[in-house]
Amino acid sequence: MIRKSDVMLSCGWLVITGSVFGVVLLPSAKKEQALLSEIARLRADLTQPTSGPEMIARLSSDLEALKEFGRGRMTPIPKQSNIAGLMASISHILDELGLEQSDITTKPAKQLDFASAMPVSVTLEGSFQKIYLAISRIEQLPRLIRVDRLRVSVPQTPNLSVDRSGTVRAEISLSAFFAPRDLAASAEKDDS
């Protein structure tokens, strides 16, 4: 005959064994499985060629795909600065939008590693929507231009009250990029 205490002792033993299995052995088995799958993945990576014609062909294909991706998204840096043409384009945009053009000025070009940057400052007044359109169109010009800083303020009237006409004043700092002289000169020598 089975005693009640033997049954309870056996059930307790099963519970303890199950708990040990669930708490200790099951997580370690999962960790081992994860390690085995990681080892299999690394072995598969090691079988991939790291040099030779297959790798060169794959890298060349990747490079062509990246160049194609960049062609449609990158604005080229012009060889000549043509700042007069840039200022004429900006003036045309501002006139087209009917903005009051207060001032367009340039500063001496900064020589960078692979380009030169000409700082251009534009100060204008008009509605915020027209100023936003002007900035958008300036950024879309067919040359590399970066808006460095934009300051928008409400002009004050002569009696120092706030103008509520909807007109704002914008001060825009741009950088117009072009190829540095030594790079442009070497490119011209390569063309000839």
Image (cartoon, rainbow, N blue to C red):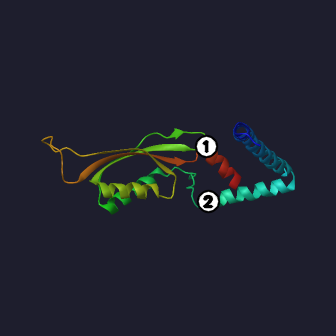
Callout 2 crowding tier (Cα within 10 Å): few <14, some 14–19, many ≥20: few
User: Looking at the picture, how far across and down is residue 165, in whole percent?
Assistant: 19, 54
Callout 1 crowding tier (Cα within 10 Å): few <14, some 14–19, many ≥20: few
Query: Which is closer to the viewer, label 2 or label 1?
Result: 2
Q: Quadrant of residue 150?
A: top left
The amino acid pointed to by label 2 is Arg
Q: Quadrant of the C terminus?
A: bottom right
Closer to the camera, 86 or 99? 99
Which residue is tagged 2?
71
Seen at 57% across and 54% down, the residue is 76
In this view, the residue farthest toward the left is 159
User: Looking at the picture, how far across and down is residue 3, in whole percent?
Assistant: 73, 39
In this view, the residue farthest toward the bottom is 96
Seen at 61% across and 43% down, the residue is 114
Q: Quick one: label 2 or label 1, which is nearer the N terminus?
A: 2
Q: Please determine whether, in this image, residue 65 is positioned above or below residue 119.
A: below
Q: Quadrant of residue 90?
A: bottom left
Q: Quadrant of the N terminus?
A: top right
The amino acid pointed to by label 1 is Phe
Side of 151 where 59 appears, left or right: right
Which residue is tagged 1?
114
Spatial CA span between label 2 and label 1: 19 Å
Please say whether residue 91 is visible from this viewpoint.
no
Numbered mark located on residue 172 in the image: none
User: Looking at the picture, how far across and down is residue 109, in whole percent?
Assistant: 49, 41
In this view, the residue farthest toward the front is 1
User: Looking at the picture, how far across and down is residue 123, in whole percent?
Assistant: 33, 47
Does dot 1 land on a helix, a strand or a loop?
loop
Seen at 86% across and 55% down, the residue is 53
Closer to the camera, 26 or 11? 11
Please say whether residue 115 is visible from this viewpoint.
yes
Does dot 2 land on a helix, a strand or a loop?
helix
